[in-house]
């Protein structure tokens, strides 16, 4: 598909609808992250409100800058799923090693800031070619498969409501499944613009019917706002945490490389070195800012490719407009209060369908490879080890060193590391 095909000369009504659809997509991918991190660090309600509004504002501005002067693609610049899982894992393990949340948070804040500086250096000194030698096409394919599986697991669990005793809330869970079926039917059988806006239709229809069937009060009030920096704790150096954060920052670069490579295929154009450099620089800057405001580090969302393939609208204009609207949520309290009532089950159900397309992107990324009884280890080993780790309880690793545990227990990180080692140590062409 050539750049601009089906994207140029959008009508005003289509641009408005596409902007709203993008807005809901960004919102659903963002709002749960600062809330879950705030709960993990046991922050006060005022601090959580501050991190949520900071997240909205910075995410909206980051999206605009990436589309304008960064990589220049319509790609959500949001909180990295890799970092999100790593931080939650560290919080879960902190008490077992006698570390308070303030101590962990302060160490992480410094570590994330250092990771942001590393990301800026990658862009400023054009170290992208070096990273591309490490993150080969096969490593990127492994990343796409594991990212798809990780996200689908998150959204599947999120759309199924659990009761306090751990069993399924049948009514809400069936509602979510019904919404998945509705959005899937619209996406597959819908024609023209109706299919393009399946995500938006699912969000709005799901929200309306959820409020009607399951009325409840919003859990977060945005009317109060007390500004502060480093809500996780005052930055201080803890060598183990710093090393883990820097390594995670380097591996997080795979998000950018995979996203821009996938965008090349989708848009039918070549991504230039300047776009990579500027993209890393913008990501690094916002990662440093995020460290100050208690936010998960930033990265281009590879999963956005699935959303674009679902909507078939590749224009940057609606994306930039939606970024501006989203930034307003962090500035105008009543807007944030209203949109915070979007039910989590609805957002997860719709995103579950949107990200099914990402699996197709992963499949297409390996079409040029041939596999036999030997070379199948090249893909099967890292993917299946990664998936196995994703489905294990963090408590299984409690006897492993606290500073190594977050990496080993993270299926996405471990799968990528295994793939990198396999690509460096084995010459697979000999066995094809």
Image: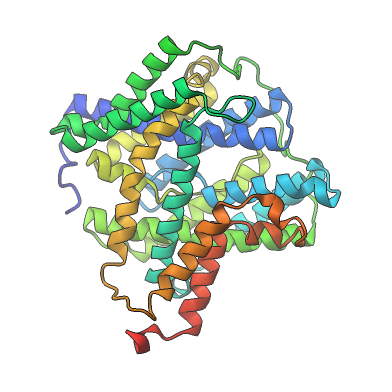
* Whether residue 18 is visible: no
The image position of residue 1, as x and y in percent, is 17, 53
- Residue at horizontal 48 percent and vertical 44 percent from the top: 153
- Residue at horizontal 32 percent and vertical 75 percent from the top: 371
Q: Residue furthest bottom?
A: 430
Q: Residue furthest right?
A: 98
Q: Residue furthest left?
A: 191
Q: Nearer the viewer, residue 188 or 392?
A: 392
The image position of residue 97, as x and y in percent, is 83, 52
The image position of residue 168, as x and y in percent, is 53, 28
In this rendering, the answer to whether 63 lies above or below 170 is below
Q: Nearer the viewer, residue 80 or 11?
A: 80
The image position of residue 25, as x and y in percent, is 39, 34
In the rendered image, which quarter contains the C terminus? bottom left
Residue 41 falls in image quadrant: top right
Along the horizontal axis of the image, is 164 left or right of 382? Answer: right
* Whether residue 57 is visible: yes
In this rendering, the answer to whether 178 lies above or below 382 is above
- Residue at horizontal 31 percent and vertical 63 percent from the top: 365
- Total numbered labels placed on residues in the image: 0
In this rendering, the answer to whether 225 lies above or below 62 is above
Q: What sort of colour scheme is used for the picture?
A: rainbow
- Residue at horizontal 43 percent and vertical 48 percent from the top: 301
Q: Nearer the viewer, residue 315 or 394?
A: 394
Along the horizontal axis of the image, is 272 left or right of 250? Answer: left
């Amino acid at each position: 598909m050539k750049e601009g095909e089906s994207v140029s000369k959008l009508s005003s009504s289509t641009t408005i609808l596409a902007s709203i659809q993008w807005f809901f997509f960004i919102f659903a991918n963002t709002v749960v992250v600062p809330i879950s991190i705030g709960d993990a660090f046991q922050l006060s309600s005022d601090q959580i409100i501050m991190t949520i509004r900071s997240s909205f504002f910075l995410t909206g501005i980051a999206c605009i800058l990436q589309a304008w002067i960064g990589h220049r693609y319509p790609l959500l610049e949001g909180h990295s799923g890799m970092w999100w899982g790593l931080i939650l894992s560290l919080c879960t393990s902190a008490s077992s090693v006698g570390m308070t949340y303030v101590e962990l948070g302060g160490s992480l804040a410094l570590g994330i800031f250092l990771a942001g500086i590393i990301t800026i250096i990658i862009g400023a000194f054009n170290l992208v070619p070096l990273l591309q030698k490490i993150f080969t096409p096969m490593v990127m394919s492994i990343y796409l498969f594991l990212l798809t599986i990780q996200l689908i697991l998150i959204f599947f669990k999120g759309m199924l409501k659990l009761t306090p005793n751990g069993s399924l809330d049948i009514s809400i869970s069936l509602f979510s499944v019904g919404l998945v079926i509705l959005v899937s039917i619209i996406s597959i059988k819908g024609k023209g613009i109706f299919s393009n806006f399946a995500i938006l239709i699912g969000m709005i229809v799901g929200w309306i019917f959820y409020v009607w069937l399951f009325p409840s009060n919003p859990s977060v009030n945005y009317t109060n706002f007390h500004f502060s920096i480093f809500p996780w704790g005052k930055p201080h150096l803890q060598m183990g945490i710093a090393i883990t954060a820097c390594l995670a920052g380097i591996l997080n670069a795979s998000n950018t490389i995979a996203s821009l490579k996938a965008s090349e295929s989708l848009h039918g154009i070549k991504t230039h070195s300047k776009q990579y450099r500027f993209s890393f620089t913008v990501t690094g800057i916002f990662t440093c800012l995020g460290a100050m405001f208690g936010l998960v580090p930033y990265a281009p969302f590879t999963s956005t490719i699935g959303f674009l393939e679902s909507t078939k609208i590749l224009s940057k204009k609606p994306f930039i407009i939606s970024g501006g609207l989203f930034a307003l949520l962090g500035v105008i309290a009543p807007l944030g209060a209203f949109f915070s009532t979007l039910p989590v089950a609805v957002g997860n159900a719709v995103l579950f369908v949107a990200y099914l397309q990402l699996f197709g992107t992963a499949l297409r990324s390996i079409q040029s490879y041939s596999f036999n009884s030997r070379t199948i280890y090249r893909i099967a080993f890292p993917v299946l080890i990664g998936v196995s780790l994703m489905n294990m309880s963090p408590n299984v690793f409690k006897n492993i060193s606290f500073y190594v545990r977050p990496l080993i227990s993270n299926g996405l990180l471990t799968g990528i590391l295994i793939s990198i080692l396999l690509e460096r140590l084995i010459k697979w062409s000999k066995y094809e």
